[in-house]
Amino acid sequence: MFDPREKIALFIDGANLYATSRALGFDIDYRKLLASFHKRGYLLRAYYYTALVEDQEYSSIRPLIDWLDYNGYKVVTKPAKEFTDSSGRRKIKGNMDIELTIDALELADVVDHYVIFSGDGDFRTLVEALQRRGRKVSVVSTMASQPPMISDDLRRQADYFIDLMTLKGDVGRDPSERPARRVENTDVDDDDDDHGDDD
């Protein structure tokens, strides 16, 4: 699947990877994740995409973002949009699909193998475009959850599908090892929530 001579780039849909690992019962150790892919080839870049709520006094994701930024990841953020749903609950919407897609296409001349950490079916067209340019694309998500966190169309389009559960030993951390943090009462909506939808 991986050739050690390949230039690899990781594209991590932060909200999607978080939801997938949570569904599987483990946390991602981002230091181990980088090390794992350094062993598979020449790791050119590792991007992490997430939307942030700007007006909060404290954001539980801020320490992770800061750590990633100082430890080998290119962090791409944008302000999340806040709204109230029909039942009056405060929701936050933050979709980073366009940012991830543009960054991936801009690197098509230098990356041999793309690894996209997302199950979002919206990325099927990106995968197809990268393949037309002669690039290999692996998608990391899971079929082990109920429902599966990966769109069937995305899984079929990818050159390789890597179930996150198979990476648990390499990149996982037990949730009990997680440092204690403040819990906020906010529902986060990743815009489409169509992990398993095939439109």
Image (cartoon, grey):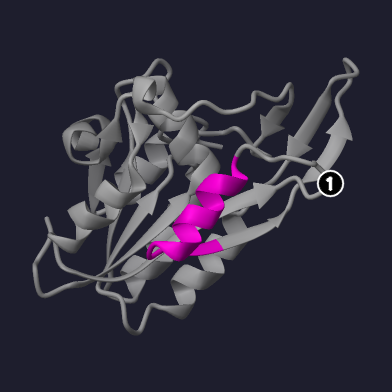
Left or right: 172, with 5 as reference point:
right
- The location of residue 48, given as percent across then percent down, is 48, 56
The residue pinned by badge 1 equals 55
Q: Is residue 99 visible?
A: yes
Q: Secondary structure at mark 1?
A: loop
- The location of residue 66, given as percent across then percent down, is 54, 56
Which residue is drawn at the image coordinates 34% and 71% (left, top)? 132
User: Does 43 lie within the magenta span?
Assistant: no
Which residue is drawn at the image coordinates 28% and 56% (left, top)? 34
Q: Quadrant of the N terminus?
A: bottom left
- The location of residue 112, given as percent across then percent down, is 25, 73
Q: Nearer the viewer, residue 175 or 87?
A: 175
User: Does 65 lie within the magenta span?
Assistant: yes
What range of the chain is rendered magenta? 61-75
Left or right: 112, with 52 as reference point:
left
Which residue is drawn at the image coordinates 38% and 78% (left, top)? 108
Residue 15 sits in quarter: top right
Q: Predominant secondary structure in magenta? A: helix
- Amino acid found under the numbered disc labelled 1: Asp
Residue 89 vertical position relative to residue 57 in the rendered view, above or below: above
